[in-house]
Image (cartoon, grey):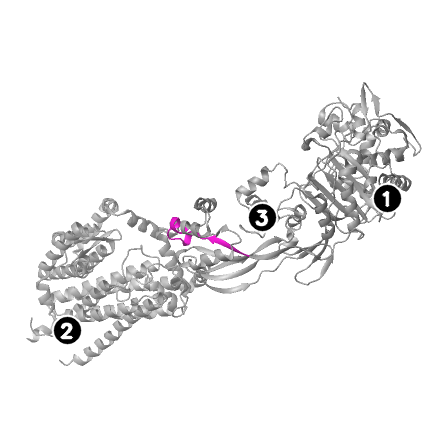
Amino acid sequence: MRESYFPQEETRDLQSRIYWLFGLIVLALCGLLLRAWYLQVVKGKFYYELSENNRIRVVETPPPRGLIYDRNGALLVNNVPSFNLYVVLGDMPDQTEVLSRLADLIGMPQEEIVRRVTFKKEDPFFPIKIKDDLTMKEVALIEGHGLDLPGVKIEAEFKRNAIHGNLAAHLLGYVGEITQSQLESGSYQNLKRGGIIGQYGIEQSFDAVIRGIPGQKRIEVDALGHEIRVLEVNEPQRGNDVFLTLDLNVQKVAEEALGGRNGAIVAMDPRNGEVLAMVSHPAFNPNLLSQGASSEAWEAILKDEGRPLTNRVIQGQYPPGSTFKIVMGAALLETKEASPASRVECRGFLHFGNRNFRDWKRGGHGTVDLHRAMVESCDVYFYEMGNRLGVDNIAKFSHLFGLGHPTGIELASEKGGLIPSTEWKRQARKEPWYPGETLSVSIGQGYVSTTPLQLAMMTNVVANKGISHPPQILKKVRDQVTGSIQEIPTAEGKRIPISPETFRVLHASLAGVVSDPHGTANGSKSQFVSIGGKTGTAQVIGMKGGVHGKLPDKFNDHAWFVAFAPVESPKIAVVVLVENGGHGGSAAAPLSKRLIEAYLGIAPPLEPITVKSPAPPPSAIPSEG
Amino acid sequence: MIDRRSIAGYDWLLFVVVILILGIGVVSIYSVTSASEARSPLYMKQIYWIILGWVVFLVMAWIDYHEIARFAYPIYAVTLLLLVLVLLIGRTVLGAQRWLSFGFFNMQPSELAKISLLLVSAKYFSDYFPKKGLNLRQLLVPGSLVLLPMLLILKQPDLGTALAISSVFFSMVLVIGLRSKFLIYFSLMSLMMFPFLWQFFWNRLRGYQRERLLTFVDPTNDPTGTGYHIIQSKIAIGSGGLFGKGLFGGTQSQLKFLPESHTDFIFSVFSEEWGFVGIFIFFMLFFFLLLWGVEIAYKAKDVLGSLLAVGIIGLISFYFLVNVGMTLGVMPVVGVPLPLVSYGGTSMVTTMGLLGLLFNVKLRRFMLFY
């Protein structure tokens, strides 16, 4: 019985080796403990950071953009709250079902939603914007069905809002999501995908000033990317406010004056180059584009024959017509090819080479000097004088007045126009210059083309008697942080090498254009202020004979009027272009008068401007070819 | 009779150790599942399983292990039958065919296989005890006894349990010893056979199993798939540091970055929240449990008891080492639970039963007859 206290013989054999087993297990335990020590103590900090990176996501909060005011502090563009609809595909257990439910709720075709979704789905947790600016009813509907719509969320965001809609649309511009190529260009270094930047106009040019600094939100997320709680919030900083040189009242008058016609109006202060008004019509609604217009809407805008996305003031290139005679006058006097007293006999045409170059006035102007030629816009006088000057002299003076090259205004895609010369023709056309072509150039036709803004620069120089200020559109910036206002200094004026005497003569004749009973713009004479100006009629197609009234509108001539006032001490220069408007004196000049009177604060109460439909004046059509 | 009190003292300590380990499990499960508002929370279910586990413990401790061992072969036969049945009519859960449905409850014959193999191996080796160590011929019969259920389980497929079964066998072989001549032959043969064996087993592994093994070699190879478990587990444990992030403070597990956090990766949860200090204490508890088992094996009255104890220690150690090693990224991801800690009834009841059997061996050390 006591024997069983003692182990069996075999168990003794076992006992010695049980230590082996035990030893092995202890060894393994120690190994694992060492491993734990390595992970937790040696590499603990490394793994701690990894775990923090797992759980914390930094979300950027877009900053509200700075406000845009006119020169007098009238608000032009601000931000208004908007509820936008986003979907996060990664959070949807059944995409098809949720998306179809969503489509029913907001009354949007499901294909449209799917199209937007498939457009960018690299990252399943990237919120994709489906719809902007939900109505309160839609918000309520979606919130109410929240449980059935996993992965659908509504974000309250700021929407860019141009208060006056289409007003000054080309100048103000619009904003939009940064594009892939913009991201890759490297010019927007702190921006990420989905960031909003200015894509056009002021919004684009001064984007860096207006944009602001994004805020950051550190949020804790779970493994599926769901926000658990907010750990830290850095509020975004609104962008700086900008004050434009634009005058809202002048702009309004200009917009109304142009009305539904296609064309452009630009008003500037010749003393400093500030842009007071800038109209290009047809325009677009920046609010629609800022909110990411649908592809159909974009298509419609891009295909519109009126080219609403073209800023005619800086991109429209037109023959300047008779407004070019200002340059001609200056060239004549400066080169002494003619004195103010030099006369030319006008019988309604000039025979040159083997062709007749017509004057716009069938019967001719009789014997005219420079003053009369300007006032009555005699073509024959300038044909004759142009021939004396030669095209290269004309080109030289054109450049002095700022024609033929971009003015350097801070808006993208400004066009340069063209001032022909013998050198240009040899290079561009591989042909010599023919003397007959100089005659066309002399009355602002032929190869000559300028933008309305360049003509405004020319008018500025004349108004200023030789001092040219580069165009300026930004007047001051209000810093968001300090609240201080920084005035943008006027760029120093450049003196044009043309004598004051020449300008005296020009002023007198340009004043005559409006004040003289025979002046081409006499109908627009103001009873309140002296206006100097020049009409112009730019031919759209070459035509034999003056049969314009019978043509469809789109072949009608473009009507120009360039003006400054008051003549004695000019405070405003205006350029009006009415596309297919017919004659400058009847179609464009009255608009300038309205604008000038409005700006100088002496406008009579607003009344609709009635512009006679383009009468059939046999305008300045040289009968080429 | 004289030693009774001191032994009772020991066992009281063991009781405390087991309770502490179980407690660690419940607290960790509570921590990681507290956020979800289930009607009957998992930690409560786990407590029910623990209670059932103690009942099984008592039953297994009560019946003389010799009586149990007498039924080793019939139990083994039934196990094989059930394993074959599983393959024929078993329920498929998550791509693995492991369950037999008996209407009111589902059973997993592979769990039974562990116990029956423990019994049958101990029984066989004690009946035919090779005094001078094992030679090849003596290994043939027990080897086949192991290989048969192993292959059936591999077929399900359940790599974890198959390896666990072999661990019972190998721990016994280790303790019995191999003849030195045979040891040399065996090693040489194994070396030569290795490529063929590797080929054989590798071809029989399912795609995902191979993937797991490959991922183990290089977790970054598949960071969102199988490698994800290992990476997230290492981050959880590593970020715990020396003192841990505190209860409910484990962001990896609380924010669900760590998958299967209440079952196979419960150790990562515990480590993240309690740090190296927690791990050390946890290891000490397990070390004490194993030490207790080794002592029982050492002092067992007969070969049967000793081998039973050795097999149980081998099995529990296997689970512990593989599971913890997996969470620490030094073992491949083989889905095995951490004994007494992972959530789950089967593992709890089985482990408690095994501990009961261990206690059984100890209880009968001083019995005068059997």
Whether labels 3 and 1 belong to a single chain: the reply is yes
Q: Quadrant of the C terminus of chain A?
A: top right
Label 3 and label 1: CA atoms lie apart by: 43 Å
Label drawn at residue A136: none
What chain does mark 1 sit on?
Answer: A
- What stretch of residues is rendered in magenta? A82-98
Q: Residues within 10 Å of mark 2 (few under 14, many from 20)?
A: some
Residue A38 visible in image: no
What chain does mark 2 sit on?
Answer: B
Question: x and y percent of residue A307 in the render?
Answer: 63, 38
Whether labels 2 and 1 belong to a single chain: the reply is no
Residue at mark 1: A465
Q: Quadrant of the N terminus of chain A?
A: bottom left
Residue at mark 2: B363
Q: Amino acid at mark 1?
A: Lys
| SS at badge 2 | helix
Left or right of B38, for residue B51: left
Q: Amino acid at mark 2?
A: Leu
Label 3 and label 2: CA atoms lie apart by: 87 Å
Q: Residues within 10 Å of mark 1 (few under 14, many from 20)?
A: many
Question: x and y percent of residue B333 in the render?
Answer: 31, 55
Left or right of B215, for residue B204: left
